[in-house]
Image: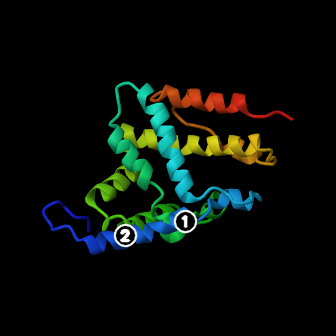
Amino acid sequence: MPNSGSDPWDADVALEALIALVPLDHLPRTGWALRGIESPESIAGHILGVAHVALALAPQVRPALDLGRVLAMALVHDAPEALSGDLPRPAARHLPAGAKKAMEASLAREILWPLSAAAADAYSEFSDQGTREARFVKKCDQLQLGVRLLAYELGGRRGLEEFWDGLVLEDTQEFPAAEGLLQALHSARPTG
């Protein structure tokens, strides 16, 4: 259970949680690995990329977003993958409805609740998708995949069309800057 603020902070518990997050540094994003990308981005690299996309787009959003909450959600949105690894979409779609989300919620309780109430709250907010900030981070998560995809293709990698086909943002009216970045990604895509 997260530290509510009235409970004394336990450095040993926090340290265990921080150590449990270390695998994010080297665990690969498996979708890229399955497509033959050598040394694919790590989950931590993806998380950092989501935060960068958020920092690029958030100043364009009106009314203004709570950037602190946005960045907290960006930092924890894939934290459970430190314990599960990155479950690629082709595998996840064979699970019963809601199974992946339930597993991630359980792992978040295990890894984030001992870290801090702020970490647990940020994960819950992102998972619930009930706030503008959470929906914005979800768009940034999707757009980061596009940024990485474009970087791979600009580096000469081909055969990643399925990722472009899946790079669709639903309901971008709330965040026009997200649609603008998506269009810029498609326009910058190498031809041939």
Q: For the point 55% across and 36% down, which residue is it?
A: 170
In the picture, residue 36 is in which quadrant?
bottom right
Question: Where is residue 84 shown, x and y percent of the image?
Answer: 52, 70
Task: Mark 1 or mark 2: name the one nearer the start of the chain.
Answer: 2
Would you name the residue on which mark 1 appears? 96
Q: Secondary structure at mark 2?
A: helix
Q: In what quadrant of the picture does the C terminus appear?
A: top right
Can residue 14 be seen here? The reply is yes
Residue at 52 percent of width and 63 percent of height: 24
- Residue shown at 66% from the left, 44% from the top: 166
> SS for tag 1?
loop
Where's the N terminus, which quadrant?
bottom left
Q: At label 2, which amino acid type do we have?
A: Ala
Q: Nearer the viewer, residue 78 or 131?
A: 78
Furthest-right residue in view? 192
- Does residue 31 sit above or below 129 in this rendering? below
Residue under label 2: 17
Asked if one can make out residue 99 in the rendered structure from this viewpoint, the answer is: no
| Residue in the picture at 79% in, 47% down | 157
